[in-house]
Image: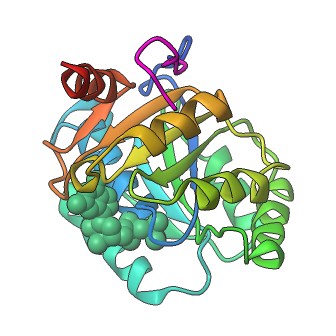
Amino acid sequence: MLTKESWKIREPEDFDPYGSQVVVFVGPPGAGKTTTLMKWAGNLAVPGGDRQQKLQLATIDQFHLANRHHLENFSSLLGVPFQATQDPQELRELVESLPMGGILLIDTEGGGRCDSTRLAAQRQFLEAAPFAHKTFLTVSAITQLEVLRDTLVAYREWPLDGVIVTNLDQANSLDVIHTFLVESNLPVVAVTDGQRIHKDFHWGPAMLLDRRESAYQ
Ligand SMILES: Nc1nc2c(ncn2[C@@H]2O[C@H](COP(=O)(O)OP(=O)(O)O)[C@@H](O)[C@H]2O)c(=O)[nH]1
Ligand SMILES: [Mg+2]
């Protein structure tokens, strides 16, 4: 049983969303990767601002056309380039063409405990285009603990740099996600609590910690 005293989640150290050049979003289907990527982009880029000039979006998802169109439309609304990369070479060229201070956010198809072959293919895709990047695991706060644990097992070979927690607005209790975060010992880089691009996205674990405080009051 999780108590207030046993609650410890990691804060990200030295994490600067403006300083991370290439970010890859991974996690189970439906966890909120594509939506979070869009929120992340929307929160980084002020229209007409310097960041907007330097931001680019991409996907390595070869299968979900609707997803790709969604991202493509969002990119044009935001006024930033988007590329659906077909192979590792194309992805590497995209990374190499980033301007100084440029930021590239990469969406993936993702997978979970039943998708080991697909996950391995995605990992090979990224490894075949080697470049420095941060990889963040996106998980939903309304997932069962066993499934969250299995997800971590599914991604055990991946170099995870942190977690993004989605669907805080949908969770009756935060005990399960809290337990998972304590167990995984991964830093929480962002949380989301709704579908609005700008308002429902929060950097770091502060929003989670606030909710946890109010749950115990
Ligand atoms: N209520 C709520 N819905 C969310 C949140 N994050 C994502 N969603 C919804 O969850 C669904 C799946 O998200 P999507 O980004 O497509 O997941 P993906 O398969 O991991 O890319 C979509 O309908 C999103 O609008 C959140 O924080 N709160
Ligand atoms: Mg998606």
**Total numbered labels:** 0
Residue drawn where x is 29% and y is 52% of the image: 171
How is this picture coloured? rainbow
Residue 45 showing in the rendered view: yes
Q: Nearer the viewer, residue 11 or 48?
A: 11
State the image quarter where residue 88 is shown: bottom right
Task: Locate residue 131, reporting x and y percent.
Answer: 76, 42
Left or right of 89 in this view: 51:
left
* Left or right, residue 211 beside residue 166: left
Specify whether 11 is left or right of 153. left
**Magenta stretch encompasses residue 130:** no
On screen, 99 above or below 12? below
Give whichever of 30, 141 is nearer the camera.
141
Give the position of the C terminus as an image quadrant: top left
The residue sitting at 79% across, 48% down in the picture is 158
- In the rendered view, does 191 fall on the left or right side of 169? right
**146 vs 63, nearest the viewer:** 146
Q: Answer yes or no: is residue 71 visible.
A: no
Image quadrant of ligand 1 equals: bottom left
State whether the magenta stretch is mostly helix, strand or loop: loop
Residue for point 49% across, 28% down = 2
Work out whether 164 lies above or below 51: below
For residue 150, which quarter of the picture?
bottom right
Give coordinates of residue 98: x percent, y percent: 56, 42
Residue at the image position 31 percent from the left and 45 percent from the top = 173
Q: What is the x, y in percent for residue 115? A: 74, 76
- How far from the left and from the top, in percent, is residue 62? 62, 82
Vertical order, 159 against 57 (above or below): above
8 within the magenta span? yes
| Range shown magenta | 1-10
Q: Looking at this view, is 23 or 150 the one in front?
A: 150
